[in-house]
Image (tube, helix red, strand yellow):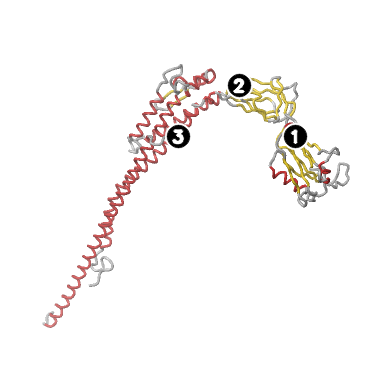
Amino acid sequence: MASISSLGIGSGLDLNGLLDQLASAERQKLTPITTQKSNYNAKISAFGKLESALDKFQQAAAKLNEAESFRAVKSNVTGDAFTAAADSSAVAGTYKISVSQLAQAHSLASAGVDDKTKDLGAGSLTINVGSDESLNITLEAGKSSLEDIRDAINAKEGGVSASIINTGALNDDGTENTTPYRLVFTSKETGTSSQINVSEGGTNTTLASILDATGTGEMQTMVLATDAKLKVNGIDIVSTSNKVEEAIQGATLSLTKTVDPASPETLTISQDSEAITKNIQSFVDAYNSLKSTIDSLMSYDAESGAAGKLLGDNTMRSVESRLRNVMTDSLGEGSLQMLSDIGIELQLDGKLEVDSEKLGELVANNPEGLSRFFGGSDAVEGFSDKLDSTLKAILDDKGLLDNATSGLKDRISSLDDRYDRVESSINSTVERYRKQFADMDMLVAEMNSTMSYLGQQFEAMNAQLGRD
């Protein structure tokens, strides 16, 4: 008999439906594996959240390990002749400043020509800017227009830039301006040390005449090269730039305008207590955010039965224990030994709270003491040093979190192998069921065929014997 092409045709039974039910029942063996893998992935994700919170806390703590954080200063200027920026090395004080002259970049202009594209003939130019190396410009016939000269100078990328200006169609007296195009040289630096000197090679009289804008063999000065001049608390200071550094220790002045020497403006540099307090508050906020993350990962709701992903996890308990120890430990020396000594109190819920009055007094009167508490000294570790050592043991490669997540990834890999083995076994079992069902279907089909044949034979015999 030919083979059965579809289960159930021979027997009339729903063998495909039965096979699907058996396959579904067999695949239930995979559910515990996928559930366990999902739990492991959820733990890895939870450790990722913990790592992110720990990293932010580590950054906030590291900032307090820098002495400059406790030497923050701010500057205030009365007036608009200059602005000021002060760094941590600036000395608090009041400074009277007057600006009598701003630094300017030297600028020269050639005589005018009627066409900026007209060739001026072969020749050469030598340009000196202060003590910089000379720029030597060689001009070829056919490539010596004002535009060519401008481009050749700018291509050298030296201490001078060149441009072309159009002075307009009319002169000041209303007559037609037949030579409106002028070549302008401008120093890239301000100050008298960056003056420009331009000379022609002596072979191109046309070019020489254009460079003689004054009739004295020189170009016309458009902007005089000047140094900045100012007084700081009566002391004369000269600068080639309007950005004046170290006239006041740790401060940079940016000059913007001159001011009557009889009415100097005032720069006040003072301790930036707000910045110091903000850094400490950021540390407290980062810890409290970390504590909230830890609490959520280890939480348990008795009413709903909902649990945090790391509830009961050994690594999580170790992280919490190490942090608690370092946060409550004493440095062992000095008047400031514990967080509570600087006004940071540990609350019953495990979070930190700042005593603003106590901390404010220390910031105002003993910022160096605060700096030593967090940053330590050459001989003794500070609080930030100890905390950093603890956090590195948790966060670094081969640290607590790395080992925990690596272990979970290894388990997931093992589960994947186990899943493949079980799935292969299930497929073999289902295929065995399919073969058995096919054999049964064929057998039943044969039996039905035999029964039908026998029935026909009995009916024929009865007809011959005259039986109804």
Residue under label 3: 55
Q: Is label 2 in a helix, a strand or a loop?
A: loop
Residue 303: image quadrant is top left
Q: Is residue 69 above or below residue 428?
A: above
Task: Look at mark 1 in the image and give the residue it sits on.
Answer: 195
Disc 3 residue type (three-letter): Asp
Q: Locate the C terminus by quadrant.
A: bottom left
Mark 2 — residue?
91
Disc 3 to disc 2, C-alpha distance: 34 Å
Q: Taking 94 as reference, is 169 left or right?
A: right
- Residue 259 image offset from top left, x and y in percent: 74, 26
- Establish if 269 lies above or below 192: above
Q: Position of residue 315 (x, y in %)?
A: 35, 34
In 3D space, how far apart are the residues under numbered discs 1 and 2 (Cα atoms)? 35 Å
Instruction: Report crowding for label 1: few under 14, some 14 to 19, many 20 or more residues within 10 A (C-alpha).
Output: many
Local SS, label 1: loop
* 181 to the left or right of 393: right
Count of numbered marks:
3
* Residue 88, horizontal then vertical, whole percent: 57, 25
Say which label, 1 or 2, has the lower sequence index: 2
Q: Earlier in the sequence, mark 3 or mark 2?
A: 3
Which numbered mark, 3 or 1, is in the foreground of this view?
1
Q: CA distance from mark 3 to mark 1?
A: 54 Å
